[in-house]
Amino acid sequence: VYTIGGLNMRISVLETTRPGAALAKRAALQDAMRQTAQEQGLDEVLLFVVDVLDESATFVSSSTRSAEMVGRAWGSAVGRSGTAKLPGVLSRKKQVGCADNDQGEPLRRRGSWDGQRTE
């Protein structure tokens, strides 16, 4: 669990060579993410399905807030399905960071992780 921009978040990565198989279960994943957030008292659960062959990630959103945060951070619109393709994103620790800035953007691309791990 990470504290980013004052929010407690679980940031999960599923690495695969077959992202289509995981993304075919998107609705079930989104339900599980919402349930996990509720059960663990988290503000957000973020999931990135990483295609290690294509060297990209697909963000799977379970809330409007997470979709807006990731959309702002990567300049990539999250579609109606609640997903966004993020080319070049492979590592939660090296490429997803924190920023408490005046625009209220708690996530952004970074060269290294500087978030506060709370668990």
Image (spheres, grey):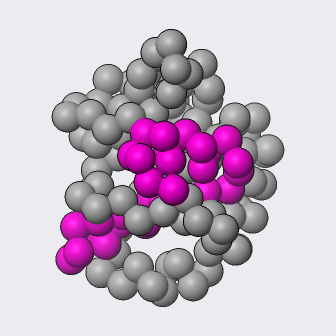
Q: Which quadrant of the view contains residue 38? A: top right
How many numbered callouts?
A: 0
Asked if the stretch drawn in magenta spans residue 57, the answer is yes
Residue at point 75% right, 64% down? 31
Residue 93 visible to an observer of this rendering: no
Tell me which residue sits at (70%, 74%) in the image. 28
Whether 67 is drawn above or below 42: the answer is: below
Q: Residue 65: which quarter of the image?
A: top right
Q: Is residue 77 above or below residue 28?
A: above
The x and y percentages for residue 71 are: 50, 47
Camera sees residue 102:
yes
Q: Nearer the viewer, residue 77 or 67?
A: 77
Q: Which residues are magenta?
A: 48-77
Q: Position of residue 7 (x, y in %)?
A: 62, 26
The image quadrant that residue 115 belongs to is top left
Q: Residue 41: x, y in percent?
A: 75, 35
Q: Nearer the viewer, residue 23 or 67?
A: 67
Left or right: residue 92 compared with residue 39: left
Indicate left or right for 15 with 4 as reference: left
Q: Give the answer, above or below, for where 76 lies relative to 54.
A: above
Return the x and y of residue 67 as percentages of the image width and height. Answer: 60, 50
Residue at position x 52%, y 20% from top?
103
Taking the image as shown, residue 4 lies to the left or right of residue 40, namely left
- The reply to whether the magenta stretch includes residue 49 is yes
Residue found at the far top of this picture: 102
**Which residue sits at x=42%, y=21%?**
99
